[in-house]
Image: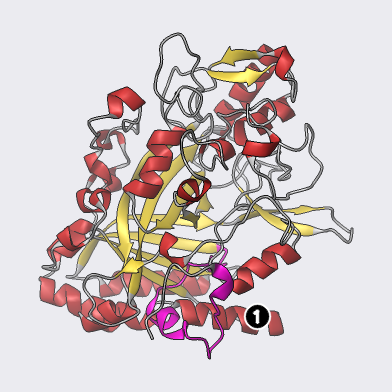
């Protein structure tokens, strides 16, 4: 049976008897749903061995260890039935366009131009000057050394053991196997950060956060009936009568693996970016903007991010309420951005009905599936007990990973045309004598672009004031990669 990837998530059944089972058995894990491990190692490789030898290593050593989507869902069910169940190590494998070339495969078979060119290309389109959509990332020469070189592959390892023994043993084994196969360009260490809310109350929950202290991952596209049902069970939205539909069809992230002849052999494009977060600079920018606008630092940070630190959406509340609901659209609740400004990160990257001259359906096709994890030690009192670092400028940030069906249509469009574009959405045609929006104050890479901040939350009559809130997040390197199907990996 050929699966229709455009069918709604409500029809995607992950049970062992489902028609979707062959697809899940041939697909790598972590694409349709986060794998849930708390600690990761990301190993970037440059191949040095003969292509036939590299192919054999991938086929015989890597493919048998790769986590499939089917096993991931089966393990999740076992964990729900027995909280002590240990799903073991996670291994995932990705190739860049340069990696495919090294193996003797022509990446022209992939329909994503950005993937074929690679992240270092930073090419700009003919209309970039008119629409302010040029690549504003730091040039590759300023990236960390490992990312300046040609990346052929990424091996992602994940585990939950507190002492990391099993993870470190797996890393050591991998490095031993790589002799004569590949050089290690960089190894990144990611660790999930979490904070408990409403301790001791019936509403107590533990949520993932990022280094500035904001809950992360609240709004994600959901691809299966099970995940959509759990979303409404958690009361992030109102089923049947809500405003925001989190569901997505599989074709938002899955594409045919061009080098596998088997049916239901799909892969996904992965964007990887190492983003340094300067905590001290962020706090300085929040304080400066608060003083300039007259808002509290708490509300100012929420207007920059789109939510308060506890997940409360600023489009609904002007103070934190521990309500992390996701059931809202800006088009109806706040079309002019006097509650959640148009420049706010959550609104820039997911405008929810406020993209000019664009249908809701077309706008939703831009979404990405985020699978990032923080790196570095957090500041004290940011999250539940882990080792901390009191240096506000310390080495910490986010290892940003996201999956999609096309890099330029999804990630690059979000980063360039929305987040980094000071004209979006208020002055998208760059008209003279019309105020711009400003770039994204959280991840925008465009310096010297003032945002327009409401003088009073929810009061359009009070007007706006301008303040240049430059991002305290800097790209340190990355690459565009592809998650091959299991049939491809096993047939190399």
Quick one: SS at disc 1? helix
**75 shown above or below 481:** below
Q: In this view, does 336 lie to the left or right of 104?
A: right
Q: What stretch is highlighted in magenta?
A: 9-38
Viewer-nearest residue: 212 or 227: 227
Name the residue carrying label 1.
79
Q: Is residue 491 left or right of residue 238?
A: left
Location of the N terminus (image quadrant): bottom left
Q: Residues within 10 Å of mark 1 (few under 14, many from 20)?
A: some
Is residue 13 one of those drawn in magenta? yes
Name which quarter of the figure residue 108 lies in: bottom left
Task: State the residue at coordinates (62%, 28%).
Answer: 341
Is residue 61 something one can see in this rendering?
Answer: yes
**8 shown above or below 433:** below
Task: State the residue at coordinates (58%, 32%).
Answer: 344
Location of the C terminus (image quadrant): bottom left
What kind of secondary structure does the magenta stretch mostly adopt? loop
Q: Where is residue 256 in the image (x, y as percent from the top left)?
A: 30, 70
Task: State the residue at coordinates (45%, 35%).
Answer: 418
Q: Residue furthest bottom?
A: 17
Viewer-nearest residue: 381 or 227: 227
Is residue 430 one of those drawn in magenta? no
Q: Where is residue 253 in the image (x, y as percent from the top left)?
A: 42, 61
């Amino acid at each position: 049976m050929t699966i229709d990837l455009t069918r709604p998530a409500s029809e995607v059944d992950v049970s062992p008897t489902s028609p979707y089972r062959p697809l899940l058995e041939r697909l790598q894990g972590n694409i349709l749903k986060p794998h849930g491990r708390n600690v990761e190692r990301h190993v970037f490789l440059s191949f040095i061995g003969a292509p036939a030898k590299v192919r054999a290593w991938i086929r015989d050593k890597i493919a048998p260890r790769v986590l499939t989507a089917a096993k991931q869902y089966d393990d999740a069910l076992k964990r729900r039935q027995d909280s002590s169940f240990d799903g073991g190590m996670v291994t995932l494998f990705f190739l860049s366009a340069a990696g495919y070339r090294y193996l003797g495969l022509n990446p022209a078979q992939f329909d994503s131009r950005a993937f074929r060119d690679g992240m270092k290309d930073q090419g700009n389109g003919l209309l970039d000057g008119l629409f302010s959509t040029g690549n504003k990332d730091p040039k590759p020469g300023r990236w960390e050394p490992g990312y300046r070189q040609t990346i052929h592959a990424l091996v992602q390892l994940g585990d939950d053991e507190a002492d990391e023994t099993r993870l470190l043993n797996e890393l050591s084994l991998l490095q031993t196997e790589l002799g004569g196969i590949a050089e290690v360009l960089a190894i990144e260490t990611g660790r999930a950060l979490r904070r408990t809310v409403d301790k001791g109350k019936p509403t107590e929950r533990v949520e993932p956060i990022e280094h500035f202290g904001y809950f992360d991952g609240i709004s994600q596209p959901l691809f299966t009936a099970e995940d959509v049902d759990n979303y409404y069970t958690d009361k992030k939205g109102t089923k049947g009568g809500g405003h925001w539909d989190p569901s997505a069809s599989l074709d938002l992230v899955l594409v045919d693996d061009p080098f596998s002849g088997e049916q239901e052999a799909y892969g996904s494009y992965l964007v990887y970016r190492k983003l340094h977060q300067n905590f001290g600079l962020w706090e300085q920018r929040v304080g400066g903007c608060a003083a300039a606008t007259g808002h509290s630092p708490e509300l100012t940070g929420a207007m920059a991010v789109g939510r308060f630190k506890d997940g409360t959406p600023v489009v609904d509340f002007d103070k934190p309420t521990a309500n992390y609901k996701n059931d809202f659209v800006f088009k109806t609740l706040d079309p002019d951005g006097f509650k959640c400004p148009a420049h706010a990160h959550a609104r820039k990257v997911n405008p929810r009905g406020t993209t000019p001259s664009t249908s809701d359906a077309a706008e939703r096709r831009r979404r990405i599936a985020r699978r990032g994890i923080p790196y570095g030690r957090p500041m004290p009192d940011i999250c539940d007990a882990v080792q901390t670092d009191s240096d506000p400028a310390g080495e910490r940030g986010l290892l940003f990973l996201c999956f999609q069906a096309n890099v330029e249509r999804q990630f690059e469009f979000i980063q360039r045309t929305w987040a980094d574009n000071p004209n979006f959405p208020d002055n998208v045609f760059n008209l003279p004598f019309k105020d711009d929006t400003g770039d994204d104050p959280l991840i925008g890479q465009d310096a010297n672009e003032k945002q327009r901040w409401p003088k009073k939350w929810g009061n359009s009559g009070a007007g706006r004031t301008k303040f240049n809130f430059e991002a305290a997040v800097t790209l340190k390197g990355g690459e565009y990669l592809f998650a091959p199907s299991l049939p491809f990996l096993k047939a190399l």
